[in-house]
Amino acid sequence: MPSICLYFQVHQPIRIKRYRIFDVGRDHNYFDDAGTSNLNNKKVLKKVIEKSYQPATELILILLKKHPEFKVSYSFSGVLLEQMEESSPDMISLFKKLIKTKRVEILAETYYHSLSFFYSRSEFESQVKLHREKIEKIFGVTPKSFRNTELAYSNELAAWADAKGYKAILAEGWDSFLGWRSPNFVYQPKGSKNIKLMLKNYKLSDDIAFRFSERSWSQWPLTAEKFSHWVSDINGNGQVINLFMDYETFGEHQWAADGIFDFLENLPRYVLQHPDNDFVTVSDAAKRYPAMDGVDVPYVVTSADTERDLSAWVGNSIQASAIDYIYKLENDIKKSGNKRLLQDWRKMQISDHFYYMCTKWFSDGDVHKYFNPYESPYDAFISFMNAATDLKLRVEKRTKRNRKLFS
């Protein structure tokens, strides 16, 4: 009996505007581009909501009403929710309707969609706490399962999540640690006691998220009926099929004209035609299914690129220097006691900033270009470092002022 676990990541960053060297020391607003460029965060979000979030969510609501067995899981970055509260409250209301059905789960993550776990454990825990508080405030629920930014995972992260009482944690079902084993089972992270590991079936997930409209693909066109047969074929050789993907898959990455919404609309009907199939949330699967085996992941595995590691964010010298620079400001930022400095510093941790600096332009090049507002990785680096330099100057000025006050 394979259960289907549909999980969607919903995130849009707050992008850094074209911040010039001449702006350093003069302009402390790093993110708000009021012009018409693709660096205008409000315009980007409005476009994504109209093309993807709104039609997809309205369709999910219809499917939840039509199919009592249908369930789905989401995670929302805090910075996305923050932007929607300000400029798109109607979208927040639409997501609230999902949660009220009691068949939609929200997962925990870092508020700022950051890589803070690998750079500052205290900052990571602060961001997870901020995220939990935001979810509780908006939706009235407390997350029970955890996913890290871009499914970045390791034994160490699983041990942390287990100690914090989470029921499940998500990761990429990557061959390097799975070997001959299938991602279609629930596993136990090495060294953990209670938490369950849910592994993305990247082949079936990517059939929808990346290959759906690829006309050169041997399985094009992909229909819900065809996909449901692939699901049913796993009967007897799997517990749960984890289909994890960005929510922008529907309407933005894959356009409505290519039939992606028709596919989603028909998927529950065809999957549920087989009496042994059903849908579960992440926590449902963790509660229902025993761990079939232990899994050892001593290194970091992510969902990005062919390497499935952190190289998409810190794989070159400009990325490494940028992220090191920003995290070295932590102590002085927090000692300053200034809320605006802290918020700006945390926004500078958003992982997308470093992703835009990626220079790996080969098989995954188009992925790195998607939603990238900069002409080159170096343009992204220059804007980031100029803004980071201004942030450091502000911190130093604040520190000197505090010393005078208490001297």
Image (spheres, rainbow, N blue to C red):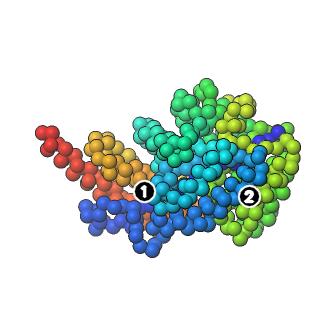
Q: Nearer the viewer, mark 1 or mark 2?
A: 2
Residue 395 seen in the figure: yes
Residue at screen point 68% across, 44% down: 103
Q: Give the x, y percent position of residue 20.
A: 33, 67
Q: Amino acid at mark 1?
A: Ile
Relative to 379, residue 188 above or below: above
Q: Is residue 60 left or right of residue 303?
A: right
Q: Give the x, y percent position of residue 346.
A: 40, 49
Q: Is residue 311 left or right of residue 328?
A: right
Could you say which is closer to the camera, residue 215 or residue 143?
143
Callout 2 secondary element: helix
Q: Is residue 63 left or right of residue 31?
A: right
Q: Quadrant of residue 278?
A: top right
Q: Residue furthest top?
A: 193
Question: Which circle marks residue 106 in the picture?
Answer: none
Question: Which circle marks residue 318 in the picture?
Answer: 1
Q: Amino acid at mark 2?
A: Leu
- How many numbered callouts? 2
Q: Give the x, y percent position of residue 393.
A: 26, 54
Q: Quadrant of residue 2?
A: top right
Q: Quadrant of the N terminus?
A: top right
Residue 374 seen in the figure: no
Question: Which circle marks residue 264 in the picture?
Answer: 2
